[in-house]
Image: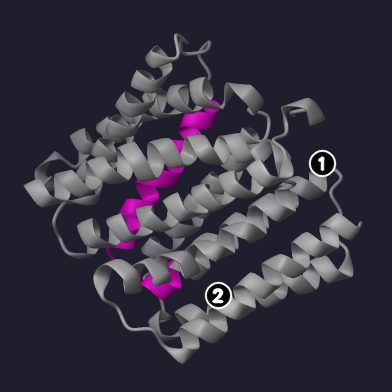
Amino acid sequence: MSGPANRPRPVVQALLTFLALSAFAANSLLCRLALRAGAIDPASFTAIRLSSGAVTLVLLLRFRGQRLPSPSWLSPFYLALYAIPFAFAYLHLQAGTGALLLFGSVQGTMVLGGYREGHRLGAIEWLGMLIAFGGLAWLVAPGVSAPDPLSAALMVIAGLAWGLYSLRGRGAGSAALPLTAANFVRATPLALAVCLVAVRSLDATAHGILLAVLSGSLASGVGYLIWYSALPGLTPVVASVVQLAVPVLAALGGIALLGEALSWRLAGASALVLGGIALTLLSRRVR
C-alpha cells in the first residue's frame, strides 16, 4: 500500500476524484450510445476500448520518458474481467438494474477489502452508505426489472472485478501512469481473444468504432489513470461510496448533452446520493 508521502493534497485529491468520476460517467454515456444503439457489438467495443486506451497511455508514457514496468498480470486480468462482462451484460440489462448490480458489487467488494485491511465502519458511515445507495435505487427505479440471469451474473462479475482492480490501485502512488498503461496493454490481448471466439457475431459501424475509441482513450485510459492517481488518498470505504455519484453525473450529462429531461426524482435522488456521500466523508474525517 502507498504511504502518506504518496497521497495527494486534499484539494488535489478532491479534484482528481471528481475528474475520475466524471470520466466514469462519460464512459457510461459512450457505452450506452454505442452498445444500446447497436452501433457496435460488445466484443469489438471492448477490444477497441482497451487497445485505444493502451495506445493513448503508452504515448503519454513515452512522452514522459518512462517505460512499462515489469510484467504483472493480476491487475490487467481484473481490468479485462470488468470490461468484457460489462459490455456483454449491457446488451440485455435495463440501465437501472445494471447500475444497481454493478455498484452494489463494487461497494460490497471494496468494503470487504477495507475490512481485511482493518478499516472498520462506524454507525454514521453505514448510515451514509445506506442513504447514498438508497438514493441510487430511487434514481434508477423506473429502469429496474427482473434481470436476465446470465446478464445479471456478468454484471456482478464486472463489479467484483472493478472493486478488486480499484483495491490494487491504492498502492499505485507516483507510478499511476506506468501501472495503468501496463494494465491496458496486458488486458488488450484478453479482449482480442474474445473477438476471435465471437468472430461470427462481430459487427461495427464507423460511429460505433469512434465511440469505442473515445471511451477507451479518454474516458477509460485517461480516466482510469486519474483514478489510480486518486486512490492512494482514499480508504476502500470512501473509494466505494464516492462511485455511487457516477450514475448521478451520467444522468446530468444526459440532460446536458443528450437533451434528456430533468425530473424531480432525479433532483431528489441526487440530493440523497450526494448527501449520503458527504455524511460518509464527514464521519470519516471526524474519526
Whole-percent x and y of residue 243?
Answer: 57, 58
Specify which label sits upstream in the sequence, 1 or 2.
1
Position in image of residue 191 (x %, y %): 31, 35
Helix, strand or loop at label 2? It is: helix
Classify residue 194 by image quadrant.
top left
Q: Main secondary structure of the magenta part?
A: helix
State which region is magenta. 74-98
How has the structure been colored for display?
one colour
Q: Which residue is mark 2?
A: 136
261 lies above or below 101: below
Residue pictured at 50% horizontal, 25% vertical: 177
- Quadrant of the drawing holding the C terminus: bottom right
In which image quadrant can residue 175 be found?
A: top right
Of the pair 53 and 156, the residue shown nearer to us: 53
Residue at 39% of width from left, 80% of height from top?
143
**Residue 216 visible in the shown view:** yes
- Taking the spot 32% from the left edge, 60% from the top edge, the residue there is 29
Return the x and y of residue 52 as percentages of the image width and height.
Answer: 28, 32
**Kind of residue at badge 1:** Glu
Q: Quadrant of the N terminus?
A: top right
SS for dot 1: loop
The residue labelled by disc 1 is 117
Vertical placement of 250 versus 14: above or below? below
Q: Is residue 97 magenta?
A: yes
**Residue 73 seen by the camera:** no
Whole-number angstrom distance, CA of label 1 to CA of label 2: 27 Å
Q: Which mark is residue 263?
A: none
Which image quarter: residue 6?
top right
Residue 42 shown left or right of residue 128 in the figure: left
